[in-house]
Structure formats: structure tokens, C-alpha cells
Image (cartoon, rainbow, N blue to C red):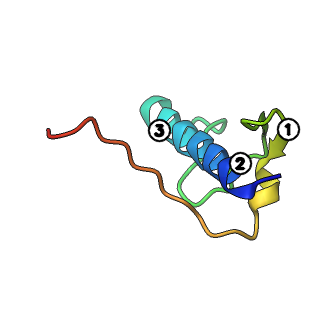
């Protein structure tokens, strides 16, 4: 398994989940993550069809993905 595409996929999903959490988290709701909480484990298919779990990347450095639509 090539690790880099799976790492990018996992990082993308984490960023997406964090963005959704920030947009929808009501004050005092225990079902949402707070800053500093560990992300819950999840499994997604990779580009090659293999199942990749977030826990496979526990000892790897974090990756930050930034997307821009061009000049703003």
C-alpha cells in the first residue's frame, strides 16, 4: 500500500470533519469534539480500494492541506 495517498485522504477527512464541527457545534453539546480532543477512529476506502483506518497514522506527522480558489 502506498502510504502517501492514504495519508492525504485521512488528513482531508479530518479537516472536513473539523470544519463541519466548527460550523455546527452548539454550546454544551457533548457529542461534538472540543479543541484538543482526539479524533474518533474511522475507516475509509483509499484510491486503490483498500480500507484505511485513522489509527494507522497515529505515529506520523500531521499534514495540513490548504485549498485556494485563486486570487481573492
Q: Mark 1 highlights which residue?
A: 50
Q: Mark 2 highlights which residue?
A: 6
Callout 3 crowding tier (Cα within 10 Å): few <14, some 14–19, many ≥20:
few
Q: Disc number at residue 66?
A: none
Q: Is residue 15 above or below residue 47?
A: below
- In percent of the image, x 55 and y 60: which residue is there? 63
Q: How many marks?
A: 3
Mark 2 or 1 closer to N-term? Answer: 2
Looking at the rendered structure, the secondary structure element under dot 1 is loop
User: In the drawing, does residue 56 fall left or right of residue 37?
Assistant: right
Mark 3 or 1 closer to N-term? Answer: 3
Q: Picture coordinates of residue 71 (x, y %)?
A: 15, 40
Label 3 and label 1: CA atoms lie apart by 26 Å
User: In the drawing, does residue 55 fall left or right of residue 61?
Assistant: right
Q: Picture coordinates of residue 45 (x, y %)?
A: 78, 34
- In percent of the image, x 58 and y 61: which residue is there? 36
Callout 2 touching callout 1 (CB < 8 Å): yes
User: In the drawing, does residue 69 fall left or right of residue 10?
Assistant: left
Callout 2 crowding tier (Cα within 10 Å): few <14, some 14–19, many ≥20:
many
Looking at the rendered structure, the secondary structure element under dot 3 is helix
Callout 3 touching callout 1 (CB < 8 Å): no
- In percent of the image, x 45 and y 39: which residue is there? 22
- In percent of the image, x 72 and y 35: which residue is there? 47
Mark 3 or 2 closer to N-term? Answer: 2
Which of discs 3 and 1 lies nearer the camera? The answer is: 1
Q: Mark 3 highlights which residue?
A: 19
Q: Picture coordinates of residue 58 (x, y %)?
A: 76, 64
| Outermost residue toward the top in this view | 24
Amino acid at each position: 500500500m502506498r502510504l502517501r495517498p492514504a495519508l492525504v485522504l485521512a488528513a482531508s477527512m479530518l479537516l472536513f470533519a473539523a470544519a463541519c464541527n466548527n460550523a455546527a457545534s452548539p454550546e454544551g453539546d457533548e457529542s461534538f469534539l472540543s479543541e484538543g480532543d482526539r479524533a474518533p477512529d474511522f475507516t475509509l476506502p483509499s484510491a486503490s480500494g483498500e480500507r484505511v483506518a485513522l489509527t494507522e497514522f497515529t505515529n506520523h506527522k500531521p499534514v495540513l492541506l490548504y485549498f485556494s480558489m485563486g486570487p481573492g
